[in-house]
Image (cartoon, rainbow, N blue to C red):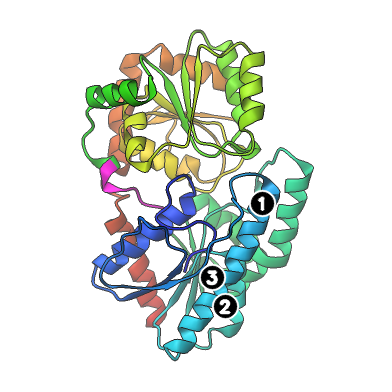
């Protein structure tokens, strides 16, 4: 069951929705009948073993401002709960398990599911372990956590955490260890296939006018992603170009800051790009930068690693579970402009190090992070609850 926020398959961003869509298809491909409660985009493709229970999408865009994000998650969770409850009643509660990804919808289902085991996948770290750029967002996230998330953790039958760090945070709230399984997100096979850097560079040059060496950021343009610190770090770094892929409420602010810092010749904002072009941005980049203040286990890191792209990332939440210092990337403290700038300069000036890290990056995800592997791990959790 989805969170009811973004339609699937997702065109731009929304890592949790990408996770649900791919996991659902991967489980169905293993021969299981899956009833999927979600809002669906016209481009949707679903395995023949999937039975859809469609819900409506919000007319408000969740990627504009934090207030819109909050409204879309609340209303989306309510729609997902109503859709799931209808499916349960229509099928006379004959399901083996319920697997939910929304906090509010999971909490409501815990009161109405009867004897069907309920599994909840937690994608984001709790607010007390994160840093946010505004007091408003901090207060809202803490209230939501206290009223909804902490209760959901206690009420569901099992929790899947997408990182080891996240499991540790959940356990701090006195949730037993054996109630939590750590199962990472997966990455699409297209990112795992061998990359042709020359071909990707030619496509980017033709479609986007991007030429030469660059570092890359992919994601929403929000304060939580720490992009202000990235721009300040680029100002200090010597002649390093950066491509920023994505959109969001901070776009105008970041464009203004870029001009103030005199980075117009070195920073390119592409806006959202089609999903089929993303691999080319990763493959042609020298390295990937994620200066986030708070994260769960970001899908973009797995995608970058899969394409053989070294990582520079903030040492927050689940990122240290997959980015190993000096092996496939570099870690920096969040908000530390000087450390971030030094890491950027180090990789920009060292093609041999980048090449070695790139080989290790691909090896990191090649065998462990395909969706088929992830689906098999999730099925083992289902089977344990059914038993």
**Residue 316 has which mark?**
none
Q: SS at mark 3?
A: helix
For residue 80, the mark is 3
- Between marks 2 and 3 in the image, the one whose residue lies nearer the viewer: 3
Q: Residue at x 51, y 8 (%)?
A: 238
Q: Which mark is residue 68?
A: 1
Residue 116 visible from this viewpoint? no
Residue beneath label 2, please?
109
Structural distance between the alpha carbons of marks 2 and 3: 10 Å
**Residue 94: quadrant of the picture:** bottom left
Percent from the top left, x then y, of residue 328?
A: 37, 31
Q: Residue at x 29, y 51 (%)?
A: 370
Report whether 281 appears left or right of 150.
Answer: left
Find the magenta span and give its range. Answer: 185-190
Majority SS type along the magenta span: loop
Residue at 28% over, 38% down: 363
């Amino acid at each position: 069951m989805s969170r009811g926020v973004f339609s699937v398959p997702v065109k731009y961003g929304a890592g949790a929705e990408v996770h649900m869509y791919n996991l659902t298809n991967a489980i169905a491909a293993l021969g299981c009948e899956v009833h999927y409660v979600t809002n669906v985009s016209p481009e949707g493709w679903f395995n023949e073993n999937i039975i859809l229970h469609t819900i409506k999408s919000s007319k408000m865009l969740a990627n504009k401002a934090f207030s819109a994000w909050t409204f879309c998650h609340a209303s989306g969770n309510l729609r997902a709960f109503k859709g799931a409850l209808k499916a349960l009643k229509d099928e006379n509660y004959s399901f083996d398990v319920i697997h939910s990804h929304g906090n509010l919808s999971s909490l409501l289902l815990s009161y109405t599911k009867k004897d069907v085991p309920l599994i909840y996948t937690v994608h984001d770290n709790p607010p007390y372990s994160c840093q946010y750029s505004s007091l408003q967002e901090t207060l809202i996230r803490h209230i939501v956590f206290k009223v909804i998330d902490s209760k959901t953790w206690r009420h569901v039958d099992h929790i899947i955490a997408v990182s080891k760090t996240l499991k540790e945070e959940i356990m701090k709230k006195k949730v037993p260890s054996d109630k939590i399984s750590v199962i990472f997100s997966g990455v699409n096979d297209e990112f795992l296939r061998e990359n042709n850097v020359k071909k990707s560079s030619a496509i980017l040059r033709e479609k986007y006018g991007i030429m030469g060496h660059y570092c890359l950021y992919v994601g929403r343009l929000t304060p939580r992603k720490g992009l202000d610190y990235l721009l300040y770090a680029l100002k200090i770094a010597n002649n390093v170009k950066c491509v920023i892929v994505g959109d969001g409420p901070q776009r105008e602010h970041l464009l203004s800051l870029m001009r103030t810092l005199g980075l117009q010749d070195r920073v390119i904002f592409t806006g959202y790009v089609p999903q089929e072009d993303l691999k080319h941005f990763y493959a042609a980049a020298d390295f990937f930068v994620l200066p986030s203040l708070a994260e769960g286990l970001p899908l973009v890191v797995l995608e970058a690693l899969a394409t053989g792209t070294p990582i520079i990332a903030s040492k927050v939440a689940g990122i240290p579970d997959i980015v190993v210092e000096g092996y496939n990337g570099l870690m920096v403290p969040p908000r530390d402009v000087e450390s971030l700038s030094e890491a950027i300069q180090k990789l920009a000036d060292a093609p041999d190090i980048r090449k070695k890290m790139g080989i290790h990056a691909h090896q990191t995800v090649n065998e462990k992070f395909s969706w088929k592997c992830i689906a098999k791990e999730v099925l083992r959790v289902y089977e344990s609850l059914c038993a």
